[in-house]
Image (spheres, rainbow, N blue to C red):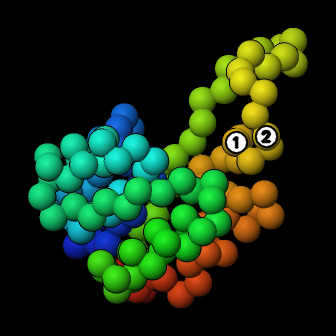
């Protein structure tokens, strides 16, 4: 897969793995947008990487996902690569079947950008892709 000259969105891009992925995509000559909940972390990423688009959002919120898609369309006119990096760390003892985390709702533990309907990000982004070389 060619990963140069692409329009890329990284959720959870304000820190950690998401920030490192955004940096690598930038190094390879891509245009990048990052989404995340923490405005301070997003601003720090934007300062480090001028030209990077940031969108403060919580991907567990349908309204925020729609706003994120709209921002990507406005900035890039489409999207080539989506990295669903946002997630929640939840400690669990799989052998005992016990959870050690907070007592959150089901929506807290949806993997990487999916919503409880199971439709995920693509349900909020019909037609976002630009096509082109794989």
Residue at 31% across / 41% down in the picture?
Answer: 41
- Give the residue at mark 1: 108
Q: Is residue 42 above or below residue 75?
A: above
- Left or right of 1? Residue 29 is left
Residue at 80% across / 43% down in the picture?
Answer: 106
Residue at 75% across / 34% down in the picture?
Answer: 104
Query: Which quadrant of the structure image shows residue 105?
Result: top right
Q: Residues within 10 Å of mark 1 (few under 14, many from 20)?
A: some
Between 124 and 17, the residue placed more toward the observer is: 124
Percent of width and height locating residue 9: 39, 63
Label 1 – label 2 distance at C-alpha: 6 Å
Q: Is residue 30 above or below residue 86?
A: below
Residue at 74% across / 47% down in the picture?
Answer: 107
Q: Quadrant of the N terminus?
A: bottom left
Q: How many numbered discs?
A: 2
Q: Is residue 2 visible?
A: no
Q: Quadrant of the C terminus?
A: bottom left
Percent of width and height locating residue 29: 17, 64
Between 40 and 112, the residue placed more toward the observer is: 40
- Give the residue at mark 2: 105
- Left or right of 51? Residue 34 is right
Query: Which quadrant of the structure image shows residue 74?
Result: bottom left
Query: Which quadrant of the structure image shows residue 117?
Result: bottom right
In terms of secondary structure, where does tag 1 sit? helix
- Left or right of 55? Residue 126 is right
In terms of secondary structure, where does tag 2 sit? loop
Do labels 1 and 2 touch, CB within 8 Å? yes
Q: Residues within 10 Å of mark 2 (few under 14, many from 20)?
A: few
């Amino acid at each position: 897969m060619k990963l140069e000259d692409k329009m890329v969105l990284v959720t959870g891009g304000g820190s950690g793995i998401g920030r490192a992925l955004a940096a690598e995509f930038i190094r390879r000559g891509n245009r990048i947008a990052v989404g995340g909940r923490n405005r301070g972390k997003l601003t720090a990423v934007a300062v480090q990487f001028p030209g990077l688009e940031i969108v403060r959002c919580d991907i567990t919120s349908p309204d925020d996902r729609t706003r994120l898609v709209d921002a990507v369309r406005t900035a890039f006119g489409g999207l080539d690569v989506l990295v669903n990096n946002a997630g929640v760390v939840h400690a669990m003892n799989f052998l005992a079947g016990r959870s050690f985390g907070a007592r959150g709702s089901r929506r807290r533990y949806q993997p990487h950008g999916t919503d409880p309907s199971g439709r995920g990000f693509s349900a909020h982004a019909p037609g976002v892709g630009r096509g082109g070389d794989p």
